Amino acid sequence: MRRTLSIWVENRSGELSRIVGLFAARGYNIESLTVADTPQRNISLVTVVTTGTDHAIEQIVKRVDKQVCVLKALDVTDLRHAEREIAVVSVKLNVGPALREVLQLVARNRLKLVDVSQDTLTLEATGDCAAINEIIALLSSLGIRDIVRSGVVAVADLPPRAAGQEALHPAMNLGSAVPGFSDSASKAEL
Amino acid sequence: MEANLNSSATTVQEDYAAHTPRDVVRGARILCEALLHEGVDTIFGYPGGAVLPIYDELAKMRGHLRHILARHEQGAVHMAEGYAKATGKVGVVLVTSGPGATNAVTGIANAYMDSTPLVVFTGQVPRKLIGSDAFQEIDTVGITMPCTKYNYLARNACDLAEIVKEAFYIAGTGRPGPVLVDIPKDVANEKAPFIYPERVRLPGYRPSVLADPGQVQRAMAKIGTAKRPILYVGGGVIHSGGTDELVELAERLGLPVTPTLMGLGCFPSGHPLSLGMLGMHGSYWANMAISESDLIIAIGARFDDRVTGAVDKFARQAEIIQVDIDPSSIGKNVRAHIALVGDAKSVMRQMLEALPEEACRDSSVRLAAWWDQIEAWKVHAPLTYENSDQVIKPQFLCQELYRLTQGNAIIATDVGQHQMWLAQYYGFKGPRQSITSGGLGTMGFGFPAALGAQVAFPNRQVIAFVGDGGFQMTAQELATAVQYKTNIKIVVMNNNYLGMVRQWQELFYDHAYSAVAMEWLPNFVKLAEAYGAVGLRATRPEELQGVLERGLSTPGVVVMDIVVALEENVYPMIPPGAGLKEMVLR
């Protein structure tokens, strides 16, 4: 099953390699991988999309979570969360009914026009995986020249840690708001 | 001995504090001072080009930091592991870049699999040459990433003190393991102020010590009512120093205890509650007991495949309480019903405090039928072998070793038949006596590991119990053993075969022996003599006692070549793919 994992990690050299290595060592394929800074100094957020059985995913999340520089690894798939991805698609510029359809999508803000050249339209789509796939399917009739996808980022609407405590976004207030991070017992809950 | 070393280290720290308060010194000096701050007195290593500045500094520290020169980097790491296993302290290794580092990898991986705390320092080519395929350059951090708990490339001399502090902290806390620090040659030469940090800042690394009290309550309620409970205990009990707590817990509840290979000695083998080791070559009654139990209390043990046999057939009626400091060990191979994440000793303390009095009072009644059943299994298939007056049986050798050392020796083994027989027939009395390569199963581990233990405890009886195959993998460390005037005794269980592989070829490959006979062996007696050690040999049962007695009591390094029955098999045995109840008794 497809799973989306959010991993908050101290920004030290080699950490990404360490995390990715855990997947490679077990023969798991990474479908997408994004890394970027968070508002918290020195903390990066890694988002991994992978596929595996529940047991395998649970194990890999635990393995990642126990890495020295990982603050928290979380499988957000079953949490309330939003996923977004950008796809930049270049298509042949052919005047015809298909073009009108594309321009309508642009008008409805489903697609952005990035660039127009002599014979190529470059378009940008943002959305979750399904939305992107749908738009790519629509564009295919125009003759797709290239597709570049960014990989998924995910924002989880995290459950409150304990009654009465507000669930802040982990990146905003590490040490108190990453679930289980400051509470070692829950880091290990089954 | 230990006290002396510690006090000398303290004096040195004071010396340095007096002479170099925040002085600017080179990286190599920072490293050495940091080691003294960590209480290190012994380093196992091998020099080379990239670590020249560090060895230069070490020479100036003579008398404060003892360096043991191994004869191969793998040997150095195994020695450090033996030292760490015997003492509970962090073992320290120093090797050079490139081949020095790659030779160390087997040892590092071994320590990783057996959760041994080590800090390994490797030299690296100067920073400006990194990535240029320079002489003796290899990506050590990359190579060791999967077999270390953590590793570092030191980029600046000013980072070194903090890195060393973190490395020792990470190696020795939580689930222990090896940490590697790669130091480019020019970083060791670069000057920086020496400021040793007071504490580490590792927000992502917070090993839990105490388990959730609610979970402890739930666990104790289960333990108080179980009818067929069993304590399944492993290396985690030894790492945490939890033997006393384990004995108390077992005794107050009258629970049967079965240790893993790594757990040997964490519960006294001769204790009436001990069932002996379980698993592939464990005792029949231990395997039956865990298979038929209704509650397994696993403490610091990881349900290794050599313990569970076929997982789908493992202890089907049992609920499982799992105590482990490593959350990723819980439920990894077998589902745990109650997880207690924490340090084994501390969690057992919690369990003892939460122990309901009535559970202890009625336990002898509640568990009477269970113990009757266990006794019946013991009678049905006791651990036994057929002795001989023609050839030395390897099991008899282990029994003789036990008898002559009264179970008090520190014994290190490799992997294979000799390891299993020793586990079966040498009743380890206490923790940190058995040093073995359990997880990685490394041939050549036993002798250097025993040497490391002997370096830590010069006055204790330390024995390397190895096979003829494994001994040849690290026999060059005889030079180290003799150079440092150790009293180590090496018992070579010589059956002229890679015995365990041969046993599997016999049983599962229709007797087709393929590359398992040692068709040419060195004369181990002469080999010992060539190194300046004493060599003895026993080939007949009537010679055994004399040779062992003489060998064990002769001062200095002694190699005892004990020629045993060639094709003896280790029984009982769980065939690969079978469940624990499908033991082959002989």
Image (tube, coloured by chain):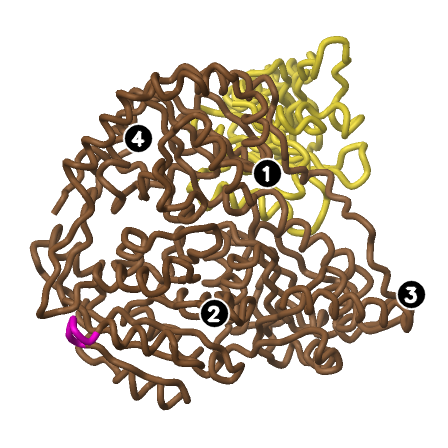
Where disc 3 sits, the SS reads: loop
Q: Are circles 2 and 1 on residues that touch, CB within 8 Å?
A: no
On the image, the x and y values in percent for residue A43 come to 75, 38
On the image, the x and y values in percent for residue B300 come to 48, 38
Which chain is home to disc 4?
B
Q: Is residue A179 left or right of residue B160?
A: left
Alpha carbons under labels 3 and 4: distance apart? 58 Å
Q: Nearer the viewer, residue B493 or B324?
A: B493
Q: Is residue B449 left or right of residue B377?
A: right
Q: Nearer the viewer, residue B584 or B56?
A: B584
Q: Is residue A26 above or below residue B541?
A: above
Q: Which residues are magenta?
A: B539-543
The crowding category of the residue bearing disc 2, from other C-alpha atoms within 10 Å (few below 14, some 14 to 19, many at least 20), is many
Residue B290: mark in rendering = 4
Alpha carbons under labels 3 and 1: distance apart? 35 Å
Q: Which residue is mark 2?
A: B74
